[in-house]
Image (cartoon, grey):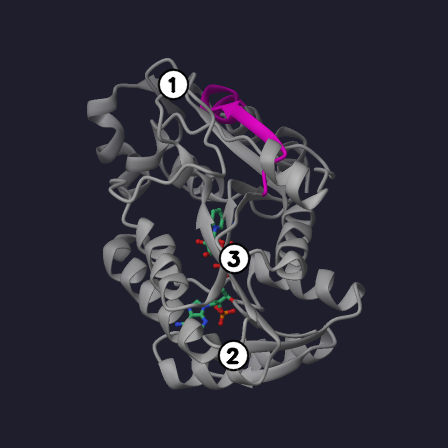
Amino acid sequence: MRVFVTGATGFVGSAVVQELIQAGHQVLGLSRSDAGAQALTAAGAQVHRGDLEDLDSLRSGAAQADGVIHCAFNHDFSNFVAICETDRRAIEALGSALTGSNHPLVITSGTGMGNTVPGQPASEDNFNPNHPNPRKASELAGVAVAERGGNVSVVRLPQVHDPAKQGLITYAIAIAREKGVSAYVGDGLNRFPAVHRLAAASVYRLALEKAAPGARYHAVAEEGVSVKEIAEAIGSGLKMPVVSISPEEANAHFGWLGMFMGYDMPASSALTQQRLGWRPSGPLLLADLDDHFKA
Ligand SMILES: NC(=O)c1ccc[n+]([C@@H]2O[C@H](COP(=O)([O-])OP(=O)(O)OC[C@H]3O[C@@H](n4cnc5c(N)ncnc54)[C@H](OP(=O)(O)O)[C@@H]3O)[C@@H](O)[C@H]2O)c1
């Protein structure tokens, strides 16, 4: 297939590009910069210049492809509601270019969207349209495209890691460096699910190839690593004290990250493994964190 990949220069999207090319697909990757265009060419992809805010550029990229994988996202978390709305508009624009063709559109969400029962792992088949996290806008946009006849599936990600980056934990490391302590909230037994970056990329490829309308997949290798263990790994890596802070202190300590650090968000990939034949692989989160601090 010829696949239009947005976010093709990003942490997850660049692994998706590699995975697609290795599997024999052609990639048309979105880039908003010369540096990104050069990286895509070096990776063996063709380049489509554009921007998430330029909806015509998204529509024209999608119209040139047999399928789309949407990984772009502007991670300005200080403006989270607005950037989630940007994602909604981007998904609707990509979908509008594909409607009527049955070409698959694979969009990105977070596993937290499937946490509908407190304490229970998120399941692929659960989605709370009234979720307090504004990122629900991405999945709601997917639903809107599907209602207009688009073939949309969703890949939900947990903390995606390699030795360089580990999702929200990368921001927690920066805050620990700034504050001189590695903190967790309360007893720290709340859990973050995780997956290695390359394993996540294979879920996107399989989802694209399966092209099952309305499917939701979880690229999850580890159902839940406690935030206390994560904070301890950061404390050990940075050689600094590990402390518990109260939920009331979380926003002052972590800033925008405070809304995530106390969440218990375990997630299952049982249905994904069954439906895609995917098996998690690669190093575990704490091993990659260990390697991060050794580097
Ligand atoms: N990484 C994780 O642990 C994790 C966890 C849950 C969900 N997710 C989701 O997974 C997706 C991929 O995340 P990631 O970690 O790969 O993010 P990332 O490394 O920050 O990459 C973001 C990508 O989006 C592109 N982008 C940002 N703003 C853009 C704009 N205005 N126009 C065009 N392109 C733009 C970036 O292009 P440039 O190269 O030009 O900056 C880059 O290719 C996102 O939806 C993210 O929210 C990630």
Mark closer to the chain start, 2 or 1: 2
- Residue with the mark numbered 3: 213
Asked if residue 31 is positioned above or below residue 191 in the image, the reply reads below
Number of the front mark, 1 or 3: 3
Give how far across and how far down residue 12 sits, in percent.
58, 56
Callout 2 secondary element: helix
CA–CA distance in space, label 3 to label 2: 17 Å
Give how far across and how far down residue 60 sits, in percent.
48, 86
Give how far across and how far down residue 105 sits, in percent.
52, 66
Residue 54 placement: quadrant: bottom left
Q: Are marks 3 and 2 in contact (CB under 8 Å)?
A: no
Stretch in magenta: 219-232
Callout 3 secondary element: loop
- Residue with the mark numbered 2: 62
Q: Amino acid at mark 3?
A: Pro
Asked if residue 21 is positioned above or below residue 38 in the image, the reply reads above
Instruction: From the viewer's side, name the closer residue of 157 and 159.
Output: 157
Give how far across and how far down residue 198 sits, in percent.
69, 50
